[in-house]
Image (cartoon, rainbow, N blue to C red):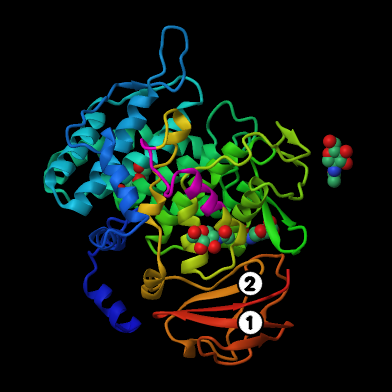
Amino acid sequence: MTTSLLLQLLFLLPFVSAFVHPGLLVTSSDITRIKTKLAAQLDPWQSSWNKLISIKYSQSTYTNNAVSSVYRDTVGDVHANAQNLWHDAAAAFNLGLRWKVEGDPQFAKAAANILTAWGEKLTNFDIGDDKYLTTGLQGHQLVNAAELIRDYAPFADSGLKTFTDMFSNVILTKNMFFLNHEAGSEHNPKHFFANWELCNMASVMAFGVFTENQTLFDFSVEYFKTGIGNGAINNAISNLVREPGTGKVIGQPQESGRDQGHTGLDFQLLGVIAQQAWNQGVDLYSYNSSRILLGAEYYARYNLGNDVPFVNYTNGIVFYDQISSASRGAYRPTWELLYAHYAQIKGLDVPWTEQYKNHTVESMGGFEGGAGSWGEGSGHYDGLGWGSLLYHLDSSDVDALSSPTGQTSSISSSSAVLTGATAHSDISSSTSVSPVSTFIPTTTTLSSALAPGTTFATSTSSTSSTASASSTTYIYEYDCGF
Ligand SMILES: *[C@@H]1O[C@H](CO)[C@@H](O)[C@H](O)[C@H]1NC(C)=O
Ligand SMILES: *[C@@H]1O[C@H](CO)[C@@H](O)[C@H](O)[C@H]1NC(C)=O
Ligand SMILES: *[C@@H]1O[C@H](CO)[C@@H](O)[C@H](O)[C@H]1NC(C)=O
Ligand SMILES: *[C@@H]1O[C@H](CO)[C@@H](O)[C@H](O)[C@H]1NC(C)=O
């Protein structure tokens, strides 16, 4: 369909939502791919699926553990019970996924019962700041589960409103309060480590999509780009440094002087935020020279046992003058997603991220598990996981890829990537690629129209480049120095 025809159709159908459903961590095309792989009994999808359907959090007989007050911390007579919520969120998501893949309504019904029960009961959290971890971590998970059964009629008819009202009053208000820096304990806007803000951003974004609230969706995208706290990407990946040996730019993560476990959580949550946005046609992966990737490369290189430069870091409260080796090599299910996106969808060179994906998959027994399948304790439930099931692509999938609409040109650190052109004639000698960050100093002009596979030169340097194409998406890469 041509762009103008598409625009005309949109004009004629003014009430059609701009939001795609399901459009958070799972899309219809993900479901289609999973079904195809399972029909052919291919791995890693089949092993992942066998694990998913074997655990107690994926059974239609699962009963909810909803309570009115969720506490992460035991204080005096009040006992921590947040596992009730993270177990139930994992179950609601797994059951929603089973319904989408298997089509049996008993799974959607079980997921709806869980979400409705929490909608009826939840009102309160810890007195201290740890409640903001619950509202972010479990907040984005609950909405991801709800998004999967959004079109299950019995839920749409009743439970959905109960769930949505609770979420809006009890969780979203705290997400927003926290991200608007109203928490009294904040000594300054960078007081909280990145993961605290990232999970709340993921929650706001998810709820914006689920309820088709553009204001909420835009708020989280804007916070990612220009927020003043550590969840904003330029603060979450706080410093750019050069990789020893190659001289490539990599990004020092905000929590890397603290420990590697929390830094890994940042990449898990950045993956959630970027994927949720991507599925709505907004590319945060490529934002500011693919800053998420620059950080992932730094993290993966260090956690695989290699050296990295470290820039002194302070937020006014903590000060680090060296990287922390605490929990070095820790893994979390997120690297399948980052690898699939950057290496396979964008066609970028991601050597450390690829190795870390392999390290994670091997450490987890052949595939990335999900919440409820790879251990207990809060860290195992910070994200929903199942990366090998949801995101792993083989070469046939890569060939079939087409770009989501609305992507714009972007530049990555060691290569500039222009995506979203629907034909290579869109790129001509007059196409100029403007730097999106200050560390790429010049505007670069491509020398001529390019066919996929062509090597070409840029006006700024003598380095050669390659154009590549997959389906209708043409990706032009060239080396632009820094
Ligand atoms: C979007 O969410 C905000 C925050 O809850 C709310 O104030 C606003 O009314 C919502 N907008 C729409 C169009 O529902
Ligand atoms: C980093 O901090 C250390 C103190 O721990 C100090 O000696 C060093 O000069 C600092 N480096 C820079 C570049 O400021
Ligand atoms: C990662 O694992 C895949 C599959 O086993 C293998 O083909 C690839 O070479 C590995 N990559 C690296 C960088 O070790
Ligand atoms: C990109 O990162 C650079 C270096 O940290 C920063 O100066 C610049 O403001 C960022 N640009 C955007 C658009 O976020």
| Amino acid under disc 2 | Ser
Q: Quadrant of residue 257?
A: top right
Q: Give percent across and percent down for residue 330.
A: 57, 39
Mark 2: give few (<14), some (14-19) or many (20+) Cα within 10 Å.
some
Going 65% across and 43% down the picture, which residue do you hit? Answer: 254
Q: Examine the structure image and report whether residue 96 is included in the region drawn in magenta.
A: no
- Counting from the top left corner in percent of width and height, residue 308 is at 74, 50
Mark 2 and mark 1: Cα distance apart in space: 9 Å
SS at mark 2? loop
On-image quarter of the C terminus? bottom right
Q: Which residue is mark 1?
A: 465
Give the residue type at disc 1: Ser
Determine whether the residue tagged by mark 1 lies in a helix, strand or loop.
Answer: strand
- Magenta stretch in the rendered image: 356-373
**Residue position marked by numbered label 2 in the rendering:** 415
Q: Relative to 412, does residue 459 appear above or below in the rendering?
A: below
Residue 10 visible in image: yes
Residue in the foreground of this view, choosing between 182 and 194: 194
Q: Residue furthest top?
A: 77
Q: x and y percent of residue 105 in the render?
A: 12, 46
Q: Are marks 2 and 1 in contact (CB under 8 Å)?
A: yes
Q: What residue is drawn where x is 40% and y is 44%?
A: 369
Disc tally is: 2
Q: Residues within 10 Å of mark 1 (few under 14, many from 20)?
A: some
Q: Position of 117 compared to 352: left or right?
A: left
Q: Residue at x 67, y 87 (%)?
A: 457
